[in-house]
Image (cartoon, rainbow, N blue to C red):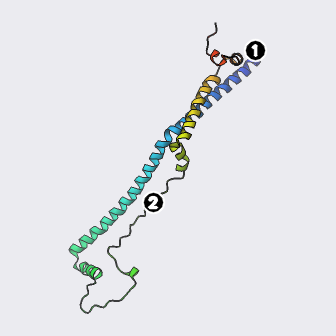
């Protein structure tokens, strides 16, 4: 008969312990959301800026390579210099014929389109979920307050006890005027 009485007490104690730890885990999650979201948002924005700068740097490196080839060709290839002068300044040789073509089909040395396109200025989709917790101070304050109250309530009401009967006695004692403080007083 004693085993049947002990079983519900053990189950209730285990349930209270589980509720206590789940409550603490929830409170820690809420606190970490508020504490880490500004840093995470800054990291995402810095990473996006880094990638955009890298793409721009690669494009500039390709442009430098192209211009270096033009400089080398100007120094070593007289035929290229003649063609460039003909394109840039309209210089012609005697007896040379010019055929008129559309402007978009003409040779243009200075028209260097970047090889790589800059990425769009949009940040990842999850930034909109993180941003309120990083910049909205009233929301951050409410979450921190709720986290603190959850911890206090967990330590006040969800502490695992050895016997459920003691918990019931404590709940009865809390109904009085000094009930909450009576829980922490030592029995005389």
Q: Residue lying farthest right?
A: 1
The relative height of residue 6 versus residue 154 in the rendered view (above or below) is above
Q: Which residue is mark 2?
A: 119
> Which corner quadrant of the image does residue 66 belong to?
bottom left
| Residue at the far top in the pictured view | 188
Q: Is residue 102 above or below residue 67?
A: below
Q: CA distance from mark 1 to mark 2?
A: 72 Å
> Residue drawn at (64%, 15%), measured in percent from left and top?
182
Q: Residue visible at 61% across and 11% down?
A: 186
* Horizontal side, residue 142 vs residue 177: left or right: left
Say if residue 27 shows up in the picture: no
Q: Quadrant of residue 167?
A: top right
Residue drawn at 24 percent across, 91 percent down: 94
In what quadrant of the picture does the N terminus appear? Answer: top right
Which element type, helix, strand or loop, lies under badge 2? loop
Q: Nearer the viewer, residue 2 or 31?
A: 31
Q: Nearer the viewer, residue 52 or 38?
A: 38
Estimate how packed mark 2 is, as few (under 14), some (14 to 19) or many (20 or more) residues with alpha carbons within 10 Å: few
Q: Residues within 10 Å of mark 1 (few under 14, many from 20)?
A: few
Q: Is residue 85 left or right of residue 188?
A: left
Q: Looking at the picture, how far across and down is residue 147, in whole percent? A: 57, 33
The residue that label 1 is drawn on is: 2
Using the rendered view, name the quadrant where residue 156 is placed.
Answer: top right
Which quarter of the rendered picture does the C terminus lie within?
Answer: top right
Count of labels in the image:
2
């Amino acid at each position: 008969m004693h085993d049947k009485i002990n079983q519900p007490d053990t189950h209730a104690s285990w349930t209270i312990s589980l509720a206590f730890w789940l409550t603490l885990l929830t409170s820690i999650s809420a606190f970490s959301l508020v504490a880490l979201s500004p840093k995470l948002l800054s990291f995402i924005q810095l990473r996006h800026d880094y990638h955009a700068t890298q793409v721009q740097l690669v494009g500039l490196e390709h442009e430098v390579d192209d211009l270096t080839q033009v400089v080398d060709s100007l120094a070593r290839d007289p035929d290229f210099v003649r063609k460039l002068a003909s394109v840039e300044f309209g210089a012609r040789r005697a007896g040379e014929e010019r055929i008129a073509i559309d402007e978009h089909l003409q040779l243009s040395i200075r028209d260097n389109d970047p090889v790589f396109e800059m990425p769009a200025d949009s940040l990842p989709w999850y930034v909109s979920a993180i941003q309120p917790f990083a910049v909205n101070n009233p929301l951050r304050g409410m979450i921190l307050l709720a986290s603190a109250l959850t911890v206090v309530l967990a330590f006040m009401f969800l502490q695992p006890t050895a016997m459920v009967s003691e918990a019931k006695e404590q709940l009865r004692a809390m109904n009085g005027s000094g009930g909450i403080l009576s829980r922490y007083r030592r029995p005389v």
